[in-house]
């Protein structure tokens, strides 16, 4: 008698959000997602990494909305105009999404790849965790994460209390870590024009 093993595939729907809603003070208040890297806006590189992994994809932006809309994706803004940080963009995406899972990445890490983002989604599912966050060398990279959209009400309360730190909020929940240490270069990001020049020369 033959025994057939059936592997259940992760059937959860995944929404992706690219965080491009910050003020970029160290970049002279330029809109980082629209700064060009290798001939393309930074947000285009994030879109390329995210698209194979998600069922739908949003851009979180609070400025230049008309320009972001030209990328052909829904553009969502924070619920307030006070630039409250990454969690505000994450909450906006959670409120909009109909999926079980939200996958998050920033707009300014153009070396990130789809396969690594898929590991975050898979790890959260395999551990039945609230969230899965990328780590490298023991350091959390908390804006690279997959999380349950059911956390949206808790996140809203957290933000309403005046708190803003992503890592502090994640530690309130069952969060698993995914080690990206062998691929540490994917976390190289652009916070200043000097960092942009360095990245251009080393990628």
Image (cartoon, helix red, strand yellow):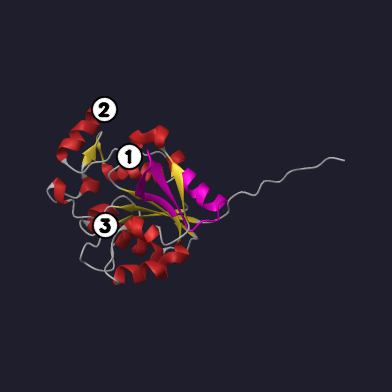
Q: Quadrant of the N terminus?
A: top right
Side (left or right) of 147 relative to 11 = left
Crowding near the residue tagged with mark 3, few <14, some 14–19, many ≥20 C-alpha atoms within 10 Å: many
Tell me: 17 left or right of 83: right
Rendered view: 81 above or below 2: below
What is the crowding at mark 2: few (fewer than 14 residues within 10 Å), some, or many (at least 20)? few
The correct choice, above or below, for 54 with respect to 173 in the image is above
Q: Taking 201 as reference, is 173 left or right?
A: right
Q: How many marks?
A: 3
Q: Report helix, strand or loop for mark 1.
A: helix
Q: Earlier in the sequence, mark 2 or mark 1?
A: 1
- Look at the image and give the residue range highlighted in magenta: 118-146
**Which callout, 3 or 2, points to the residue nearer the camera?**
2
- Residue hosting label 3: 61
Magenta region includes residue 140: yes
Q: Position of residue 11 (x, y in %)?
A: 58, 54
Q: What is the crowding at mark 1: few (fewer than 14 residues within 10 Å), some, or many (at least 20)?
A: some
Front one among 64 and 4: 4
Hey, which residue is sitting farthest front in the picture? 138
Mark 3 vs mark 1, foreground winner is 1
Q: Nearer the viewer, residue 109 or 180?
A: 180
Q: CA distance from mark 2 to mark 1?
A: 13 Å
Label 2 element class: helix
Say which residue label 1 marks: 187
Q: Is residue 193 visible?
A: yes
Cα separation between marks 3 and 1: 21 Å
- The residue at which mark 2 appears reads as 202
- Confirm whether the magenta stretch covers residue 168: no
Residue 115 lies, in percent from the top left, at 46, 39
């Amino acid at each position: 008698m033959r025994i057939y093993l059936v592997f259940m595939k992760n059937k959860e729907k995944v929404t992706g959000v690219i965080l491009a809603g910050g003020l970029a003070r160290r970049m002279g208040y330029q809109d980082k997602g629209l700064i060009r890297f290798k001939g393309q806006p930074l947000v285009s590189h994030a879109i390329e990494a995210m698209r194979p992994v998600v069922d739908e994809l949003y851009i979180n932006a609070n400025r230049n909305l008309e320009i972001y809309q030209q990328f052909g994706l829904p553009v969502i803004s924070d619920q307030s105009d006070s630039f409250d940080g990454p969690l505000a963009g994450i909450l906006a995406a959670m409120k909009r999404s109909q999926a079980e899972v939200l996958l998050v990445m920033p707009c300014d890490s153009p070396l990130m790849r789809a396969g690594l983002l898929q590991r975050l989604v898979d790890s959260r599912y395999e551990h039945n965790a609230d969230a899965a966050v990328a780590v490298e060398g023991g350091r959390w990279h908390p804006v690279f994460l997959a999380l349950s959209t059911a956390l949206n009400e808790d996140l809203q309360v957290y933000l309403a209390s005046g708190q803003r730190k992503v890592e502090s909020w994640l530690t309130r929940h069952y969060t698993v870590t995914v080690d990206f240490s062998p691929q540490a270069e994917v976390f190289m990001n652009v916070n200043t024009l000097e960092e942009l020049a360095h990245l251009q020369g080393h990628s």
